[in-house]
Image (tube, rainbow, N blue to C red):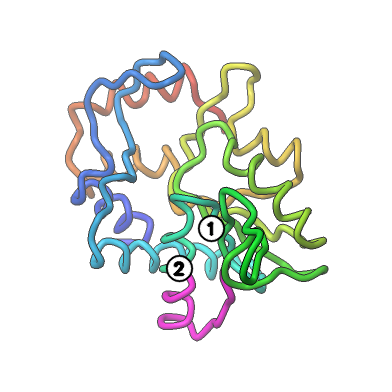
Amino acid sequence: MTYKQQFIKFMVDNGVLKFGEFTLKSGRKAPYFINTGNYKSGAQLGKLGEYYAQCIVDNGIKADTLVGPAYKGIPLAVTTAVSLYGKHGIDMDYCFDRKEVKDHGEGGLFVGKQLKDGERVIIIEDVMTSGKALREILPKLKASADVEIAGMVISVDRMERGLESGLSAVQEVYKEFGVKVYSIVTMSDIIGAIEDGIIEGREYLPQMLEYRKTYGVE
């Protein structure tokens, strides 16, 4: 199996990727659901970091620092930094934002690496639904230093158009901010994994294909 296929199986095995009928915040009825809140063990987090690290390496994303937006992005950035070093010999700094600026002690908006002008950063997140996390972290980054955003890495690109435009969330943030979003896998990869028998769920394949046809973007 490719690492993408392994990751899809990993999500299914850990109850993160489920099939059925789910009502999303948008009101759409989706045949699959991704709940990253089901990651809860050291073994899961360690393996998850390996997939993020592999995505960064495979896409050749060059950067100095990983940024994990609070709160879900924090453990993701940490485990990715550990995996980059342990598996690939790449030693990257990491940092994460505070919800409020600390006005005592060392102060500052970020914990970990203190960002500097010209620094290249990768933002690490779980999934992207509307681009809200990116929109919140970008002003904080720019207020801290004149950094360059090398990219954003997420686990799954739903490849689904938003409610307000014909673009997906990934496409919208690129159009608005010029930030390229890399995903470990896409909805097309998940459909392919079902078709190839990597994971169970063939009974949901017609619904997956219909949903992709109705709401999907390339």
Find numbered disc 2 in the image and state the secondary structure of the residue it sits on: helix
**Mark 2, residue position:** 78
> Could you tell me residue 39's position as x and y percent?
28, 52
Which residue is pictured at 57% across the width and 66% down the height? 111
Does 21 appear above or below 32?
above
Determine the residue located farthest toward the bottom in the rendered image: 89
Task: Judge left or right: residue 115 versus residue 8.
Answer: right
Question: What crowding class fits label 2: few (fewer than 14 Cα within 10 Å), some (14-19), or many (20 or more)?
Answer: many
Find numbered disc 1 in the image and state the secondary structure of the residue it sits on: strand
Front residue of 9/118: it is: 118
Q: For residue 68, which numbered disc appears in the image?
A: 1
The amino acid type of the residue labelled 1 equals Gly
Task: Judge left or right: residue 136 versus residue 210.
Answer: right
> Could you tell me residue 38's position as x and y percent?
26, 46
> Could you tell me residue 29's position as x and y percent?
35, 16
User: Within the image, what quadrant is residue 147 found in?
Assistant: bottom right
Quadrant housing the C terminus = top right
In reply to whether residue 146 is colored magenta, the answer given is no
In reply to whether residue 81 is colored magenta, the answer given is yes
Question: What crowding class fits label 1: few (fewer than 14 Cα within 10 Å), some (14-19), or many (20 or more)?
Answer: many
Stretch in magenta = 80-94
Contact (Cβ within 8 Å) of mark 2 with mark 1? yes
Q: Main secondary structure of the magenta part?
A: helix
